Amino acid sequence: MPLFTSRALYEAASASALALPAAELYRFTSRSDAEAARVGGKWFMVLAEKDGTQLVNLKAYPADVAAIIETHPAALPAWHMNKTHWYTLTAHPDLTPTLLAELIAESYITVVETLPKTKRPLGWETIAESLTA
């Protein structure tokens, strides 16, 4: 039995993203249920629904995408995104709140590291250090 219902996955992913320095959520259009989380104007998470199931798309380095999909049953090739740089998480018994928050933080760091130093938010290094500890 999954720890997350589809709606709970959406809410937990949103909360994890918003807890990161300078992260913001925005809705694509007023008619859309899809939202993106971004930092420095760049996406690191896209929340969408497909066939009544909430999906969490996260960004990663290409080698990491393949490894995440191989090692995490909740991870699938990205839905509606570039499959080289993105993967999708769905509600699955192996997806814990801790793992979800860690994968979202890794996606965030992947994007922050590509930003010019002047656009990197204060406090991002702390997030990066906590992931490597």
Image (cartoon, rainbow, N blue to C red):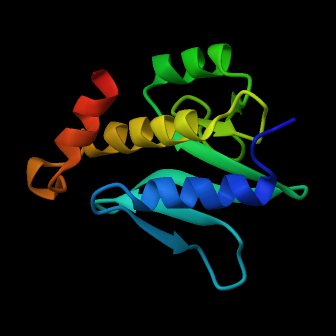
Tell me: 36 left or right of 10.
left
Q: Is residue 12 above or below residue 61?
A: below
Q: Is residue 26 above or below residue 100?
A: below
Q: Residue at x 28, y 57 (%)?
A: 21
Q: Position of residue 45 (x, y in %)?
A: 52, 51
Q: Residue at x 48, y 20 (%)?
A: 64
Q: Residue at x 76, y 60 (%)?
A: 7
Quarter holding residue 76: top right
Q: Position of residue 99 (x, y in %)?
A: 55, 33
Quadrant containing the C terminus is top left
Q: Position of residue 18 (x, y in %)?
A: 42, 62
**How many numbered markers are drawn?**
0
Quarter holding residue 122: bottom left
Q: Nearer the viewer, residue 42 or 93?
A: 93
Tell me: 74 left or right of 61.
right
Q: Nearer the viewer, residue 111 or 104?
A: 104
Residue furthest left as drawn: 118
